[in-house]
Image (cartoon, rainbow, N blue to C red):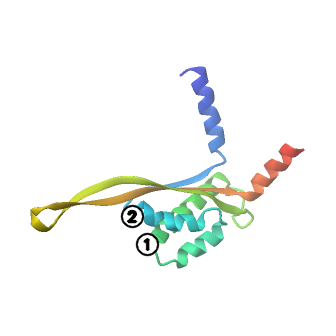
Amino acid sequence: MGSRKRLAAEARKEANKNLYVARLVDNPTSPRKMRIMADVIRGKEVDYAMNVLKYSRREAAEKLLKLLKSAVANWQVKNEGVRIEDAQLYVKSVVVDGGRMLKRIRTAPRGMAHRIRKRSNHVTIIIDDKRINNNIEENKNN
């Protein structure tokens, strides 16, 4: 590996140390339905987002709640000495991308066939700590 690639890889690795990510791949729900719930929790505090998802009746909310809990668990792994109650965790970003599409055929009148596209999606949640970000910004200003 060349020195430029190594330096870029080390910089990426250093930047990812402060990211707490959880991914859900090939979720068999259409991206449009998942984005509705993702828009509700984007930018909110983790406790508030968990309550909203817990009491929502949508199927996508159930999957997002489980994914959010996974992201919080990833935060706990990287911050062993810190209590979760002391941290000010918030949902930094939620990205819903289209996944693979299963293509099926349904019979139609006059001997024709219509195509059915069963969509899936990929969801990425990134959470962050407001307290740590405020400390970093204060250090930059001083």
Q: Which of these two is toward me, 73 or 116?
A: 116
For the image shown, how many numbered marks are present on the structure? Answer: 2
Q: In this view, does 51 lie to the left or right of 25?
A: right
State the residue at coordinates (64%, 72%). Answer: 48
- Where residue 81 sits in the image (x, y, percent)? 71, 56
State the residue at coordinates (81%, 49%). Answer: 137
Q: Can residue 26 be seen in this view?
A: no
Outermost residue toward the left in this view: 111
The answer for how far apart the CA atoms under marks 2 and 1 are is 9 Å
Q: Can residue 29 be seen in this view?
A: yes
The answer to whether marks 2 and 1 mark residues whose Cβ atoms lie closer than 8 Å is: yes
SS state under label 1: helix
SS state under label 2: loop
Q: What kind of residue is marked 2?
A: Thr
Residue 51, label in figure: none
From what the image shows, is residue 25 above or below residue 139? below
State the residue at coordinates (61%, 37%). Answer: 12
Quick one: label 2 or label 1, which is nearer the N terminus? 2
Q: Quadrant of residue 90?
A: bottom right
| Residue that badge 1 annotates | 59
From what the image shows, is residue 77 above or below residue 10? below
State the residue at coordinates (61%, 38%). Answer: 13
Q: What kind of residue is marked 1?
A: Glu
| Residue that badge 2 annotates | 29
Locate the C terminus by quadrant: top right
Q: Is residue 13 left or right of residue 114?
A: right
Outermost residue toward the top in this view: 2
- Where residue 105 sits in the image (x, y, percent)? 19, 60
Mark 1, other Cα within 10 Å: few <14 / some 14–19 / many ≥20: few
